[in-house]
Image (tube, rainbow, N blue to C red):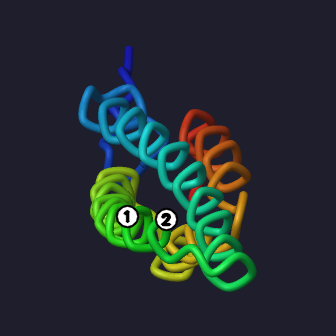
Amino acid sequence: MTAESPVTDEENPAQAVGDAGVKGALARFRVLAYIVGVGLLALCFAMIMNYVFDQPRFSAIVGPVHGFLYIVYLVMIVDLALKARWSLKGTILVMLSGVVPIGSFFAERKVTQKVRAGEAI
């Protein structure tokens, strides 16, 4: 009677999706994706207020806050990418989704589907 040898994470990255580290990283990424998406929409509104209506106070508040949150978003992407073993190209594309208004919403949905399915990005 022969028993199959267990498949390690290195041989099958999809097996690692069940790990608490990947689940936690995915949850943090999802929260930051929504926050950054809403923040970018707020920044677009602030820019309109600044350049169309000459009200720079909105940009002065929203700009730095969004910038800080975008950096935190990038850190969460790197954390998830390392734990889920993403490719460099996939990681960079997800990072760039945060600079397109509503892009982070679409990226969050796609990343969640792929990570839960154990697919590479």
Residue 108 spot, x, y in % from top left: 61, 47
Residue type pointed to by label 2? Phe
Locate residue 111 relative to residue 69 in the image: left or right.
Answer: right
Residue in the foreground of this view, choosing between 85 and 33: 33
**Residue 58 tag number:** 2
Residue 73 is marked as none
Q: Amino acid at mark 1?
A: Ile
Write the residue at 59% across / 67% down: 46
Q: Residue at x 66, y 71 (%)?
A: 49
- Marks 1 and 2 in Cβ contact (< 8 Å): yes
**Where's the C terminus, which quadrant?**
bottom right
Q: Residue most toward the top? A: 1
Q: Residues within 10 Å of mark 1 (few under 14, many from 20)?
A: few
Residue 13 place in picture, x, y as percent = 43, 48
Residue beneath disc 1 = 61
Q: Is residue 27 above or below residue 8?
A: above
Establish if 38 lies above or below 117. below
For mark 2, does the 10 Å Cα neighbourhood hold few (<14), some (14 to 19), or many (20 or more) residues? some
From what the image shows, is residue 91 above or below residue 25? Answer: below
